[in-house]
Image (cartoon, grey):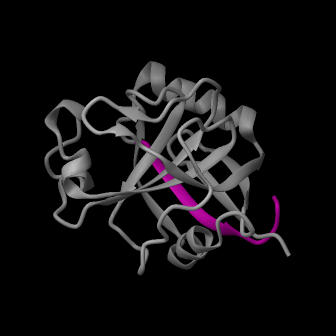
Amino acid sequence: MARYITISLDKRGVSCHARLLDEQAPRTCRAVWDALPQSDQAYHAKYARNEVYTLLSPFADPEPGRENPTVTPIPGDVVYFAFEPWEIGNPAYGYDTGSQAYDAAGATDLAIFYGRNNLLINGDAGWVPGNVFATITEGLDDIAAACQDIWLRGVEGESLTFRRADSHG
């Protein structure tokens, strides 16, 4: 039976629902599902384009490793990244020094992609593949509009929350 999660931009009061891709990314789905709920500061991507994400303390034990990876996510992709501290703790990326980006344990990044033409490349590190572990099945248009609002008006005070859903809606 398919499993679903709800993803919300809390300040804007917008949610979408995503189906876990258990067959394509079983280790990543298990790690995320077992760690839910998760919520923290939302960020809009600077380089990847149409991406909103949150940085969390690493929660997978063990890390799932690469599965169902992409560097060109499409609208509706929900993606998991595991970062070592040196990979994102760069002042040029704009994170507050107290954020998860600077934690000695590194960071887990849970991201949603809401538009086309995304490319996961970092000028400092090169390609940044992520594990596609879910696909948005309901509410993509609403969450995309809220993500565009974040791009235009800023992320201050916005949180991105991932939680288990009882069903697809």
Residue at (63, 33) in percent of width and height: 114
Give the x, y percent position of residue 148: 56, 24
Left or right: residue 24 versus residue 152 is right
Residue at (43, 72) in percent of width and height: 63
Left or right: residue 137 versus residue 16 is right
Compared with 129, 122 (above or below) is above
Give the x, y percent position of residue 96: 18, 43
Q: Quadrant of the N terminus?
A: bottom right
Q: Which quadrant holds residue 141?
A: top right
Left or right: residue 134 versus residue 156 is right
Compared with 144, 95 (above or below) is below
Give the x, y percent position of residue 97: 13, 47
Left or right: residue 36 versus residue 116 is left
Please tell me which residue lies in front, 78 or 72. Answer: 72
Q: Quadrant of the C terminus?
A: bottom right
Q: What stretch is highlighted in magenta?
A: 158-169
Residue at (56, 51) in percent of width and height: 79
Please tell me which residue lies in front, 111 or 127. Answer: 127
Compared with 82, 119 (above or below) is above
Residue at (52, 56) in percent of width and height: 161
